[in-house]
Image (tube, rainbow, N blue to C red):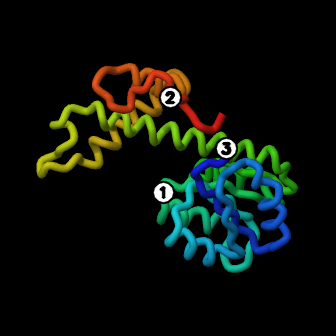
Amino acid sequence: MSINRTVLFVDDDANVLEGLRRSLHVYGFQIRCAASADDALRMMRSTPVHLVVSDQVMAGMSGIEFLHTVGRLFPDTVRFLLTGHASVEMVVDAINNQGIERVYLKPCNASDLGRGILKVLERQALANRALRIIEERKPPEAHRGKHGAASEAESAATREVVLTDAPFGWDTLIRRLESLPGSSSCRENEPVSSFH
């Protein structure tokens, strides 16, 4: 199974990185590794990364600081934190204030981490697909603002209402969007997700 998504692991312990690479290659996503936050940021500037998993305690920059920087520079990249030193306050801050999707405690079960990564990558792919379908169905005048370009506020408002207020799962959202007339992406027999 191969998934066209790149996951970057950041840890200053080479043994941890090698263990993650060996344990998680079976999940099919592309694995990249960096030994420092600076190396990871250089890599992310040249290679698209869909999800980054960082250790908390590293030389030079903490995992939370690094993931905060990732969120600022690469807002579409999902962020996970691995830590052996977590307090409840740190976990709450990481998720509520830093935009970190998940926090895993070391030692971490590789299959739990792999399944968590796949689940988030699947959600990300479905959200992107839903946004493409929404954009396809907008009337032509809705795609343009005063100067012919869609305003960021209009686009953000559309995404926010549709994606966060949906009282059902992503699969249902995609099916409902695809059932609306007027889309070239409406394919009856196409699987909703390639990650199953």
- Left or right placement of residue 160 versus residue 64 in this view: left
Q: What is the three-letter code of the residue carrying label 3?
A: Leu
Task: Sort mark 1 into few (<14), some (14-19) or many (20+) by Cα contacts within 10 Å.
Answer: few
Q: What is the three-letter code of the residue carrying label 2?
A: Glu
Which element is circle 3 on? helix
Residue sitting at 73 percent across and 65 percent down?
56
Query: Is residue 35 or residue 30 the one in the foreground?
Result: 30
Q: Nearer the viewer, mark 3 or mark 1?
A: 3
Residue that mark 3 sits on: 118
Q: Which quadrant would the C terminus be assigned to in this image? A: top right
Residue sitting at 53 percent across and 22 percent down?
168
Residue that mark 1 sits on: 75
Query: Is residue 180 or residue 163 the one in the foreground?
Result: 180
Q: Earlier in the sequence, mark 3 or mark 2?
A: 3
**Residue 11: image location, x then y, percent:** 74, 69
Query: Is residue 138 or residue 166 the one in the foreground?
Result: 138
Q: Earlier in the sequence, mark 3 or mark 1?
A: 1
**Residue 163: image location, x then y, percent:** 45, 33
As drawn, the residue found furthest toward the right would be 107
- Left or right placement of residue 171 versus residue 13 in this view: left
Q: Say whether residue 97 is visible.
A: no
**Residue 156: image location, x then y, percent:** 35, 43
Residue that mark 2 sits on: 190
Q: What is the three-letter code of the residue carrying label 1?
A: Pro
Q: Quadrant of residue 65?
A: bottom right
- Left or right placement of residue 24 versus residue 68 in this view: right
